[in-house]
């Protein structure tokens, strides 16, 4: 099994980088194609969020703002508990191509394992198994 | 890419590939910790088969055994490996193709409106 750590897509867009940049980095733009409602504080370390009619909210932290070529943020891994510290990194790169834009999006970090999760997944398991093995065997013998 | 992430996720998917083990995990998820006897009472699986599956699930770290009443071992679901597997599913469920199509549509619409 190959664990997909990174997703990468490149698309050719028939609109200039300035338009694409606005769609990616303004509340008005993001709410028009990504979320249904959005807010963004456009500076590294700034907060942003998007909401959907389903009730889902995505909280983002802006990481890179290099107008009009690089915009990046991190966000929570969908499906993991709110308090889980793991986040994926999403980076948009804009390149002018004649009258249009070549847009690349890379989302990475799906394969990361937080130190805590690693400890819980391994050491806790190994210790628990060793100490409980005797009881399990005892139970099975008694059945 | 640390291979242990893959190993943890693989154990989850192997466990979930078996319908009896899915039933056991689902029962522990919905009703909380239970003994093999409790599980046998609620599922169409023999107690011997349940004990065998619980041993496998314990070894894989997906359930943990703890002392229960009357010296019976109780089994509890462990969420950490499930959360690792969920990362894998999150990558598969991320729909950048659809999202980028929506971005193109938005820019086309905007250009038409301003034309």
Image (cartoon, coloured by chain):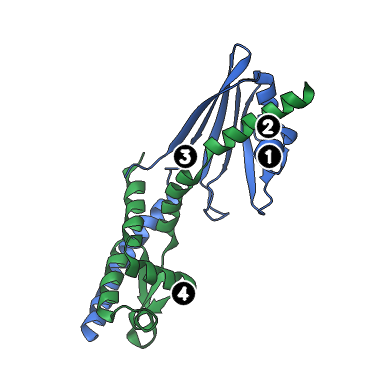
Q: Which mark is residue B32?
A: 4
Disc 3 target residue: A109
Label 1 crowd bin: few (<14), some (14–19), many (20+), radius 10 Å: some
Q: Is residue A43 visible?
A: no
Whether residues under marks 4 and 2 lie with C-beta atoms below 8 angstroms apart, the answer is no
Chain letter, disc 2 residue: B
Label 4 crowd bin: few (<14), some (14–19), many (20+), radius 10 Å: few
Residue lying at 65% horizontally and 31% vertically, measured from the top left: B105
Of circles 4 and 2, the one toward us is: 2
Cα distance in 3D space between marks 4 and 3: 32 Å
Q: Which chain is represented by blue in the image?
A: A
Q: Is residue A105 left or right of residue B46?
A: right
**Secondary structure beneath disc 3?**
loop
Of circles 2 and 3, the one toward us is: 2
Q: Which chain is represented by green in the image?
A: B
Name the foreground residue: A119 vs B78: B78
**Secondary structure beneath disc 2?**
helix
Q: Which mark is residue B106?
A: 2
Cα distance in 3D space between marks 1 and 2: 24 Å
x, y percent for residue A88: 52, 40
Residue lying at 27% horizontally and 66% vertically, measured from the top left: B56
Looking at the image, the residue that sits furthest to the left is: A141
Q: Earlier in the sequence, mark 4 or mark 2?
A: 4
Disc 1 target residue: A47
Of circles 4 and 1, the one toward us is: 4
Looking at the image, the residue that sits furthest to the bottom is: B70
């Amino acid at each position: 099994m190959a664990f997909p750590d990174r997703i990468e897509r490149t698309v050719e867009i028939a609109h200039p980088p300035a338009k694409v940049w606005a769609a990616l980095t303004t509340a008005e733009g993001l709410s028009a194609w990504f979320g249904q409602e959005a807010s963004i504080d456009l500076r590294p370390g700034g907060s942003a969020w998007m909401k959907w009619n389903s009730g889902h909210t995505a909280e983002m932290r802006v990481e890179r703002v290099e107008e009009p070529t690089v915009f990046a943020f991190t966000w929570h891994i969908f499906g993991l508990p709110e308090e889980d510290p793991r986040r994926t990194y999403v980076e948009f790169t804009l390149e002018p191509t004649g009258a249009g834009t070549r847009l690349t999006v890379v989302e990475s970090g799906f394969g990361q394992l937080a130190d805590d999760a690693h400890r819980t997944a391994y050491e806790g398991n190994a210790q628990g198994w060793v100490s409980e093995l005797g009881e399990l065997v005892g139970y099975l013998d008694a059945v | 890419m640390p291979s242990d992430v893959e190993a943890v996720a693989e154990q989850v998917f192997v466990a979930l590939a078996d319908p009896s083990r899915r039933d056991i995990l689902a029962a522990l998820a919905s009703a909380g910790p239970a003994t093999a006897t409790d599980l046998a009472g609620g599922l169409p699986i023999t107690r011997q088969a349940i004990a065998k599956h619980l041993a496998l699930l314990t070894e894989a770290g997906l359930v943990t055994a703890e002392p229960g009443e009357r010296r019976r071992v109780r089994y509890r679901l462990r969420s950490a490996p499930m959360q690792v597997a969920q990362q894998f599913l999150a990558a598969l469920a991320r729909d950048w193709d659809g999202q980028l199509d929506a971005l193109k549509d938005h820019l086309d619409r905007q250009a038409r409106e301003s034309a």
